[in-house]
Image (tube, helix red, strand yellow):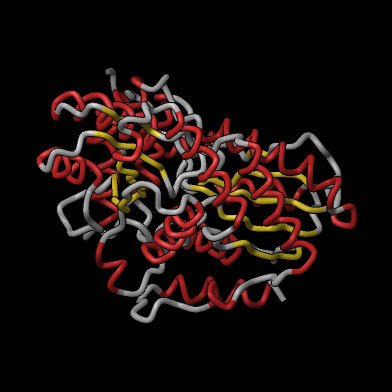
Amino acid sequence: MRAMKGIAVQKLVSQMRPFSISTTTHAKTGILMLNMGGPSNLEEVGSFLHNLFMDRDIIQLPFQNILGPRIAKRRTPSIQEKYAEIGGGSPILKWTKIQGEMMCKKLDSLCPDSAPHKAYVGFRYANPLTEHTLEEMEKDNIERVVAFTQYPQYSCSTSGSSFNAIYNHYAERNEASRMKWSVIDRWGTNPLLVDAFVDLINKELETIDDKIRDDVIILFSAHSLPMKFVQRGDPYPAEVGATVQLIMSKLRHANPYRLVWQSKVGPLPWLEPATDKAIESYIKNGKKHFLLVPIAFTSDHIETLHELDIEYGKDLAMKLGVETYRRLPALNDHPIFIDALVDLVSSHLKHGPNVTGQLLSRCPMCTNETCGKAKHWFANVCK
């Protein structure tokens, strides 16, 4: 795969534009859908990796201003190859647009006092960047903004990084935000989110021969996290585990299951067991039937379409002799999932709170000064 040539990263970043979902021009309430994002085409891979490796909330390197861009440049060709195998780019922006449109349509009916609602996308590392979208919302004269993380389970490295980016933008801005702020920071135990997973799992299990159905091991696969984050008190592992337990309780623990972790980067210790290593170990013990559930992702992107489908579902499964390998469809535009988004925002708009004490509380071993300043900022603007 040909790498990007002759295009400076800064030029790519400067070309990124904010992106709103709805076509409403005079919205009252803006729903800012926050996520990591992904490159929409092969040309954006370099800038995506550059932004990722420059974010000290998720990756901490010595001499980061030097090493970050070098690592991003070196990895760009191989990552471009992976995106080429799934169609040339990430579909995460497409799915976020669809989710936002469907959500706001229902919100306008359910919450007339805060209508009309307009959904905006704020990605951390890809177009549309959060800071550009914030300026668009200010120009649109949005009265109230709901910063709505699209990570159901909170981590300082994901949701926390997005909230820090919001704080950093206004800390560097010459004027304060004119919008009234509130935050939805975690929602991994939302009943409708759980119901959406249960519905998809039941439907997938029904397609498997009933002679082996009860033997299928459900592997809930979530993006891993460096152990140094866990050791300082990041709530992510516990919150992912809570989602899994609620799902399996509704399924009456009919199948064996485990929570496993994918997408480790670098040599340092991360959460384990790794998804691929877990599959290898089960095969050695005579287990050959698996259902992979992307439990921490709300739409398809490279972790589902390439890592789970190709690297594990095709290459690894063939190598190990896996007999049954199914990957649960991502939530995408599943109707119960859309109802979950609507339920979360409508309840938030009507009953609050504008910000939770959990968001304003730092991890017990946190040393990130930006994190502390961001929480103080949100405490003030969400009054």
Q: In this image, 232 relative to 130: left or right? A: left
Q: Is residue 309 above or below residue 111?
A: above
Instruction: Kindly give the residue lying farthest to the left in the view shown.
Output: 284
Of the 4 image quadrants, the one containing the N terminus is top left
Q: In this image, 83 relative to 183: left or right? A: left
Residue sitting at x 85%, y 56%? 114
The location of residue 200, given as percent across then percent down, is: 51, 37
The location of residue 269, given as percent across then percent down, is: 18, 59
57 and 226: which is toward the camera: 226
Q: In this image, 216 relative to 283: left or right? A: right
Residue sitting at x 40%, y 76%? 363
Residue sitting at x 63%, y 46%? 133
The location of residue 292, given as percent across then percent down, is: 35, 39
Image mark count: 0
Instruction: Kindly give the residue lying farthest to the front in the view shown.
Output: 211
- Does the image show residue 113? yes
- Does the image show residue 135? no
Q: Is residue 344 above or below residue 182?
A: above
Instruction: Kindly give the residue lying farthest to the bottom in the view shown.
Output: 364
Q: In this image, 42 relative to 275: left or right? A: right
Of the 4 image quadrants, the one containing the C terminus is bottom right
The location of residue 352, given as percent across then percent down, is: 73, 69
Give the image quarter of residue 6.
top left
Give the image quarter of residue 78.
top left
92 and 69: which is toward the camera: 92
Residue sitting at x 27%, y 60%? 226
